Amino acid sequence: MKFLVPLLLVCGALLLPRFVSLTADEGEWLPEQLHQLDFAALEARGLELSATDIWNGESGLLSAAVQINGCSSSFVSSSGLIVTNHHCGFAAINAASTVANNILRDGFVSTENAQEIPAAGYRVSFVRKYEDVTSIMHAAAEAAGPDPAARWAAVQEERRRLEQEAQSPESSAIVVPYFEGREWRRIWRTVLNDVRLVYAPPRAVGEYGGETDNWMWPRHTGDFSFFRAYVAPDGSPASYSPDNVPYQPEHFLAVSPDGVNEGDFVMILGYPGTTNRYLSSIAVAARESYYFPARYKVFDAVIKAYEEIGTRSAELELAVQSPIKSYANGFKNADGMVWGLARNKVVERKTAEEREFRAWVAADAARTSRFGGVLDQLLALDLEEYERQQHDFVLSQIQFRSSAMRTLIRSAMSGATPENQSLEAALGDYALVDERVLEVLFDMADQLSQSERIVGYDQWRENGGHFNTLADLATALVPELQAQRQFQASMAGRRLEVGAKWIEAQEMWRGKTFYPDANSTLRVSTATVKGYAPRDGVWNVAHTTVDGLIAKNQGAGDFEVPQEILQAVLANPKLAETTVCFLADGDTTGGNSGSPVVDGKGRLVGLNFDRVFENVSGDFGWNAERSRNISVDMQYVLWLMRDIWPAPRLLKEMGVE
């Protein structure tokens, strides 16, 4: 692959053209960017809200969008009721389950607030206001002098200072970069720590199709669950207490009684995790050639280890469900990335764009003066990381993917001398996970080229390295881990300037309508409900129904339709027409799980929970023909809550009895 990248840089004449203007629904937009959108065109498509209705600077429809443990969600009542995906609530549902009372398998319906189950470790947050701190952050970098690592350290210190300055019992803030650090915002938030499980369908509904259907279409998954946020009696955020009361949000979403049809306009609100739309060809090639294949291999080992542990007892089988689900999602995502980056020729497309960017810069003296060297600087940085990516991947994974090694390395880096012990003594029932993942990583380390060898690992191997002497390995790795940290800090500092200038050039080159990469902050995507053609001769329609759900039924495994649904449809065949899921061309990524999908009136019509397999690699580039997100239809959710596993108090609370 190291020989392929230079070749790609010179073969642009054979490659695909770039698109300067964005297609209609590309983009995950910041609230402050809403006024830039063409609202006349959006009105023609069905939007009945103004930009200020959606966000006026401190409130609006977006205030109902809530972040919950890395996922998105939304308030749907004046009493703090929150709806998100089943897979976002999976850990809480799993933790509340026992072998004797398995609510993960059987579902859960609370009939009063007192029955709602505390979701330990869950918290929700939502935006209160934005503050531009760009000048403060840039000044901190400049004051640190020319050393890149020192500049990066200064930026991080100023970031922490601004966040701590905002900390109080009632609020907190995060400081985040946009446009590769060209701009910075302090986002003031309310964070609520008392979150309780309210309703969850059985796993056979919430995860229907399992990993077989994950990232696929057609889909028939009832991926939803309900939680409630609580506060102290005086309305302030508080840890769990039986004296706490439901939070009363300023804004919540009305649930639509109507559903959506093909061609309808919708918006997706939420907290998308990470996209990489403005990476160079070298950076994308690095991910395609090594990072995602390696991640796939590591996650495969972890999943199989947990599955084996689960065969030892009913208690362990239940306990391992959450980590298996988490790793399985990442495992299939890595597979889709490798497949999609190759199929969509993303590296080649990036290379073609870089050729055209060079021509655009060279055509104007002012642009040449401002941006003449920026692409070469960016490629040089990316190439430095590319040349050591295998070394750094394996080293980092040894440190963080193994629980035992993470503890031992933390001890060794603090100056202590960690003691050797067996994995079984350190980890008990879960020792097998570390053993299997380290076997894979040690094999990767053995295969590293001479220029990327991990010296401390090689020394440990030469001294008879064994699983019972991992403390010795931890100590041997400390010098390289420290050097790796220094390299990463220096690289991040160098990117502060190069990245910001690169994005400035991209914005000028690509046109006025320009959005930053996702970074787990609040965004809006516009979309149309529509199908797509995954390959020649095939057209996927935009909706699935209960009829299709039952057609997949195998009575066990990933495809087991609960008897309650089968009996209801048998008694009333018309129910088979109920819509289960729908497609739209919304620009989404990880973190958008649970995002409310609203219609032109701002009413909740669905919950985003996935993308189609052809769009897994959409994090690296938009494709109007294949970029499709998948949502569970609220009509299916409401039917289940009315007639199958009834929750009349929740329906009344949402105003949809």
Image (cartoon, rainbow, N blue to C red):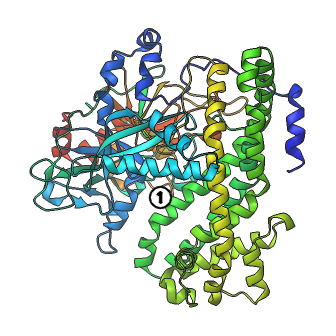
Q: Quadrant of the C terminus?
A: top left
Which residue corresponds to the image point at 54% horizontal and 28% vertical from the top-left? 515
Within the image, what quadrant is residue 114 found in? bottom left
Q: Number of marks in the image?
A: 1
- Residue 437 placed where, x, y %? 63, 72
Q: Mark 1 sits on what residue?
A: 555
Label 1 packing within 10 angstroms: few (<14), some (14-19), many (20+): few
Which residue corresponds to the image point at 65% horizontal and 68% vertical from the top-left? 481
**In this rendering, is residue 512 above or below 3?**
above
**Amino acid type, callout 1:** Gly
Within the image, what quadrant is residue 617 found in? top right
Which residue corresponds to the image point at 74% horizontal and 64% vertical from the top-left? 391
**Which residue occupies the foreground of this view, 636 or 71?**
71
For residue 647, side relative to residue 493 (left or right): left
**In this rendering, is residue 301 above or below 51?**
below
**Which residue occupies the foreground of this view, 260 or 23?**
23
- Residue 480 placed where, x, y %? 69, 70
For residue 342, side relative to residue 337 (left or right): right
- Residue 133 placed where, x, y %? 42, 35
Within the image, what quadrant is residue 406 found in? bottom right
- Residue 201 placed where, x, y %? 33, 53
Residue 581 can be seen, yes or no:
no
Residue 535 can be seen, yes or no:
yes
**Which residue occupies the foreground of this view, 366 or 3?**
366
**Element carrying mark 1:** loop
For residue 5, side relative to residue 537 (left or right): right
